[in-house]
Amino acid sequence: MSVPYYVTTPIYYVNAEPHIGHTYTTVVLDTVARYHRLAGEDTFFLTGTDEHGDKIAEIAAERGVSPQEIADEYSAAFSSTWKELGFSFDRFIRTTDPDHKSVVQAILQKVYDAGEIYFQEYEGLYCVGCERFLTDRDLEDGLCRDHERAPEKRNESNYFLRITAHFDWLADHIQQHPDFIRPERYKNEALSMLREESGLGDLCISRPKERLEWGIELPFDSNYVCYVWFDALINYLTGIGYPDGPKFEHYWGSAEHFVAKDILKPHAIFWPIMLKTMGLPVYRHLNAHGYWTVNGRKISKSLGNMVSPIDMKERYGFDAFRYFLLREMVFGLDSDFSEAALIRRINADLANNLGNLVSRTLNMTARFADGAVPKAGEPGDLEREIQAAAPETAARVDEFVRRYEFHRALEAIFEFLDRVNRYLETRAPWKAAKDPANADRVATTLYTSCESLRVIALLLASFVPDTAQEILARLGIADALKTARLPDDAGRWGVLEPGTATTKGAALFPRIEVPDEAD
Ligand code: ME8
């Protein structure tokens, strides 16, 4: 089998409809999964929903329905939205799936038998939003920093996982593998969580049933259910058939998790230690990104600013929205969303730049070459420059996608696109075609533009899949993505066969007119 590549989104809580934040992480995953598949890697893309815990039990109680009903409703909202948006995931896991429940119980028993779990009475401040006991550092003016709500004082006997005993080992591992957690700022944050003064203690992994029944029962004590984070993280193993499925053995060594910075601690600290206590190798990389704000404000239900990806798809087309998300956010840093900024990007990059090149090239091919890819004559300097830029661009895109620098990858593709637009301006085939003596030069120019469009479409295929497919179809090579290998096929020149029938089609991205005050 070919090189494995296993990527995961966080599994989303079933307490909200999917919004721009969840959509961003899933768009990133869809993009890398598509890219690595096109690069011939054996890719597995996992996403899903996180359904147990206080938070869900609380909503169910408020609504007077069972937690399972809430979980079914919201999980379906995520899975149907993800399908409607065309995400190419290989499994949508739910933590209420039967295979997940047995995996969690088997792991709990294994770790318990290994002596890594102990029982103790505990008193502390508990935040239902975080689903955990807080430390002093989590508090600001007595309120949970993340949820801005007062934690509850709780006194309970519970089971704890000995995580503190593994801090030195984990700190060493992080230092010896500098890109284990990336970008670097999050590696540094994880290291500082492991320092003694951070006050991070052992991890409480149980909840007494008298307080919370909605969870997976501990196999060694039926009075308790498993803490939701311990259960949730294990989805990354269940999703590929742990413990003895063939997929598990194939994929686990290549695991890459993607999360936003809100859930750095469970992924950077709890999860590697959990894996260690289970006797499993740790994941390959944890990739953390920043937050989306909307018009400069945090996304929240109460502000009513939860940008819906389905609304965006209906209004602008989903490719335009995904392009914006990937082009605008520097992976790792925060970014702001506004419709005005989205419209600016659509007009500048997609309508003017890309859309224009597609329509000019295909209209002229229809007019001056009878709607078929013409045969190129001898290339001049300008053609040779474009031919040389194609493999360079493909190599840069490959490097940037593999480093998760999506904005740079798109920048590189659009630099190539600009170059082709400038080339067309210089060759001006619409003028040259007036004199039949220029027929050969016009054919060469149009071949160069059509072939450049093929290169651009292959490189864009992971970022804006429907648009790329449409361009390829108009170029008469609708099946190109079925066999293409990136980066080589995008960098190879002369693949389009002269004589291939092309189609003009409507504008790919019509310009969006906005009144001036929209800015
Ligand atoms: O934390 N900006 O689920 P969750 C960017 N169930 N990304 C955002 C975002 C924003 N404003 N808001 C949400 C949980 N996200 C747990 C995870 S994993 C074993 C368990 C994205 O529904 C981002 O990926 O709160 C973030 O990490 C995740 O949604 C949190 O989703």
Image (cartoon, rainbow, N blue to C red):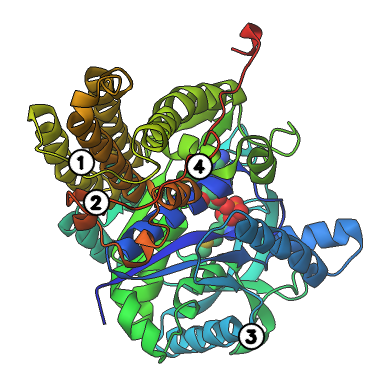
Task: Determine the residue positioned at 41% across, 44% down.
Answer: 289
State the mark number for residue 393: 1
Q: Earlier in the sequence, mark 1 or mark 3?
A: 3
Residue type at tag 3: Pro
* Disc 3 element: helix
Element type where label 1 sits in the image: helix
* Nearer the camera: disc 2 or disc 3: 2
**Is 519 placed left or right of 443 in the picture?**
right
Disc 1 versus disc 3: nearer the observer: 1
Three-letter amino acid code at the position of disc 2: Ala
Q: Earlier in the sequence, mark 4 or mark 1?
A: 4
In the rendered view, tell whether residue 237 sits above or below residue 504: below
- Which callout, 2 or 1, points at the residue further toward the start of the chain? 1
Q: Position of residue 199 (x, y in %)?
A: 42, 51
Tag 2 near tag 1, CB within 8 Å: yes
Q: Which residue is mark 2?
A: 490
Mark sitting earlier along the chain (2/4)? 4
Nearer to us of marks 4 and 1 is: 1
Give amino acid for label 4. Answer: Arg
